[in-house]
Image (cartoon, grey):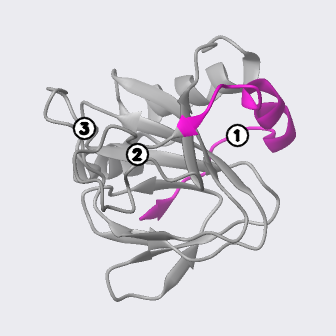
Amino acid sequence: MCELSLSYNIKKLFNEVRYTEITPYFRNNPNKDSWFCGPNTWLHGNIKNLNSPELRSLITQLEESIKTKDIKPTLILQKKGSSVPSHIDAVSKAKLNPNLCSVNVQLTEKVSPIKFNKKDFVTYHCALINTKKKHGVPKTAEDRFFIKFKIFDLTYKEALSNYLKYRL
């Protein structure tokens, strides 16, 4: 994971995306016993208005600093009192182009940490995440909103290398 230095106003950004329709993750998971089968505490929604000022600015900064040409922002809510088990971001077999990494931007003042494998918890505000490494999130004391900018054309290593070379 790498904390990124991007320019944005958290309150304006949250106001631009807060009314995005969100639903439980992976409701059609064939593994009905899985925690990831439509949990009512882990919700997401595709952000449709990509031209609002703060969101557009962030997308442009990411396009320029990591050189991505295929990025999709998603609003995610982890509800108060819930945790997210350790996992690797998966994709359904129907999708031919899985996201390879992401940039997560926390939208709440109090941020929640992330834990990779057996390492310590790491707190971040805006970070490039290797979603192909096992990670989880502990129980939260309040609702946790963040934008997950899914990156489809670069691996974590490629995105990190580009960021270190081209960061603004």
* Kind of residue at disc 2: Ser
Tell me the residue that label 2 is attached to. Answer: 102
Q: Quick check: is 10 in the magenta stretch? A: yes
Task: Give residue 7's mark.
Answer: 1
Tell me the residue that label 3 is attached to. Answer: 154
Q: Residues within 10 Å of mark 3 (few under 14, many from 20)?
A: many
Asked if disc 3 and disc 2 are in contact, CB closer than 8 Å, the reply is no
Q: Nearer the viewer, residue 35 or 161?
A: 35
Q: Residues within 10 Å of mark 2 (few under 14, many from 20)?
A: many
**Above-or-below relation of 94 to 4:** above
Tell me the CA gap for discs 1 and 2.
17 Å
Q: Quick check: is 155 in the magenta stretch? A: no
Q: Secondary structure at mark 2?
A: strand
Q: Secondary structure at mark 1?
A: loop
Please tell me which residue is depicted at 44% across the width and 53% down the height of the picture: 128
> In the rendered image, is residue 168 in sight?
no
* Kind of residue at disc 3: Leu
* Kind of residue at disc 1: Ser
Nearer-N-terminus badge (3/2): 2
Locate residue 8, reporting x and y percent.
74, 38
Q: Quadrant of the C terminus?
A: top right
Tell me the CA gap for discs 3 and 2.
10 Å
Q: Quadrant of the N terminus?
A: bottom left
Q: Where does the magenta region start and end?
A: 1-23
Q: Nearer the viewer, mark 1 or mark 3?
A: 3
Nearer-N-terminus badge (1/2): 1
**Above-or-below relation of 36 to 158:** below
Locate residue 154, reporting x and y percent.
24, 37
> In the rendered image, is residue 49 in sight?
yes
Tell me the CA gap for discs 1 and 3.
22 Å
Q: Quadrant of residue 116?
A: bottom left
Locate residue 46, reporting x and y percent.
52, 25
